[in-house]
């Protein structure tokens, strides 16, 4: 009985780690356990319900205490606590990135992310410039160029990393502004969202997660499986179903590098800004919450990128967190790219 109770408590701890600050999830969890306790009258369930309530109260108290502190003063104090913090700002683009609670900084200082950073932007820029010069005679498009270059980088990287038995992998999220169109290519579970002229959140990408029906069917057809280990994972290993790198899973064809590409009319949307971020942000914020949060902080030095990264950390995010914010200027266009 003691072993069973510890197993249940361990599972509860894992669930709370990932979903503790999502009120709707906590509410449903407590109601479900309370009903279970009512109908089956098991002492161990009653113990878990009480423990979960106590934990919720404790964490809510901590969060309230943090939020009562001065916003900017609190942020500067925390800067010194992160072993790897990286930031960048140039004109209308700002990036802020922290290692957070992870043992390693995979968003930036990792073999696959470094390879994509070193090889994708410059070659993509060259291809796009060539396309602009020969556009009238070319059958290509921005979408096809993005797709082909991303697939090329994945193939080249797999050859190099697999030779060294390096199993590193990365997401890839690229936003290209041209004329009055925005083209977004996505591989993995980094995510883009745009704030339109009315303050609405417009999704620029869709996460590639193993539990999604389309991805689950594809993985099954390839002879693979997904299992739950804190989150749904391909072959019990990878928490996303598409990536660049990850050569052992690529060899099995259960993880693929194919990007989803979406195009948006900027004249119609008249955007204020866009956010490109790794999955660490989206563990703590919905699209709508992120847009509201950043919109209120666009006058900050990093256009709200720093504040939302550290707020995600406050909310208990266990992952690395990287956020890019691009402010739109009237009549101006700018391009940006980001990889995990």
Image (spheres, rainbow, N blue to C red):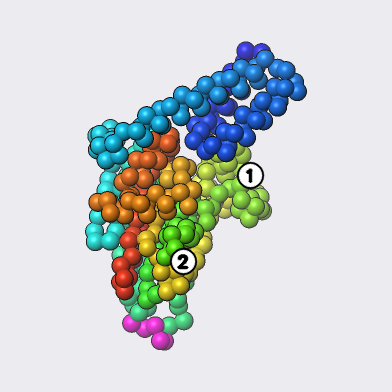
Name the residue: 36% across, 45% down: 308
Indicate yes or no whether the magenta region holds residue 250. no
Name the residue: 65% across, 52% down: 213
Q: Going from the N terminus, do you reach mark 1 or mark 2 first?
A: 2
Name the residue: 38% across, 37% down: 313
Above or below, 169 against 13 in this view is below
Residue 236 seen in this snapshot: no
Question: How many labels were placed on the picture?
Answer: 2
Question: Which region shows up in magenta?
Answer: 133-137
Separation of disc 1 and disc 2 at Cα?
Answer: 26 Å
Which of the 4 image quadrants contains residue 26?
top right
Give left or right: position of 199 versus 46: left
Secondary structure under the numbered disc 1 in the rendered image: loop
> Percent position (x, y) of residue 56?
51, 27
Give me the disc on residue 225.
1
Give me the disc on residue 147.
2
> Percent position (x, y) of residue 18?
50, 35
Dominant secondary-structure state across the stretch colored magenta: loop
Above or below, 215 against 49 in this view is below
């Amino acid at each position: 009985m003691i072993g069973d109770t510890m197993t249940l408590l361990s599972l509860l701890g894992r669930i709370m780690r990932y979903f503790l600050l999502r009120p709707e999830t906590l509410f449903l969890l407590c109601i479900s356990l309370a009903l279970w306790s009512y109908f089956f009258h098991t002492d161990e369930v009653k113990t878990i319900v009480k423990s979960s309530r106590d934990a919720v109260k404790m964490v809510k108290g901590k969060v309230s205490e943090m939020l009562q502190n001065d916003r900017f003063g609190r942020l500067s104090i925390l800067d010194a606590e992160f072993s790897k913090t990286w930031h960048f700002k140039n004109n209308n683009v700002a990036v802020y990135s922290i290692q957070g609670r992870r043992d390693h900084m995979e968003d930036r200082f990792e073999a696959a992310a470094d390879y994509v950073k070193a090889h994708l932007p410059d070659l993509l820029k060259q291809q796009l410039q060539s396309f602009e010069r020969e556009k009238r005679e070319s059958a290509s498009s921005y979408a096809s160029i993005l797709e082909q270059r991303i697939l090329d980088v994945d193939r080249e990287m797999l050859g190099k990393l697999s030779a060294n038995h390096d199993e590193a992998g990365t997401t890839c999220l690229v936003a290209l502004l041209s004329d009055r169109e925005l083209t977004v290519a996505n591989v993995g579970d980094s995510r883009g969202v745009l704030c339109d002229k009315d303050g609405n959140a417009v999704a620029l990408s869709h996460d590639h997660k193993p539990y999604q029906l389309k991805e689950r069917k594809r993985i099954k057809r390839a002879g693979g499986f997904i299992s739950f280990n804190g989150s749904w994972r391909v072959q019990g290993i990878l928490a996303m179903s598409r990536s660049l790198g990850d050569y052992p899973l690529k060899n099995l064809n259960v993880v693929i590098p194919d990007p989803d590409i979406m195009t948006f009319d900027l004249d119609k949307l008249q955007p204020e800004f866009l956010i490109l971020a790794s999955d660490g942000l989206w563990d703590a914020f919905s699209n709508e919450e992120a847009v509201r949060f950043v919109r209120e902080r666009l006058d900050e030095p990093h256009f709200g990128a720093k504040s939302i990264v550290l707020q995600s950390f406050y909310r208990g995010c266990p992952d690395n967190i990287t956020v890019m914010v691009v402010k739109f200027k009237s009549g101006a266009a700018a391009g940006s790219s980001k990889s995990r």
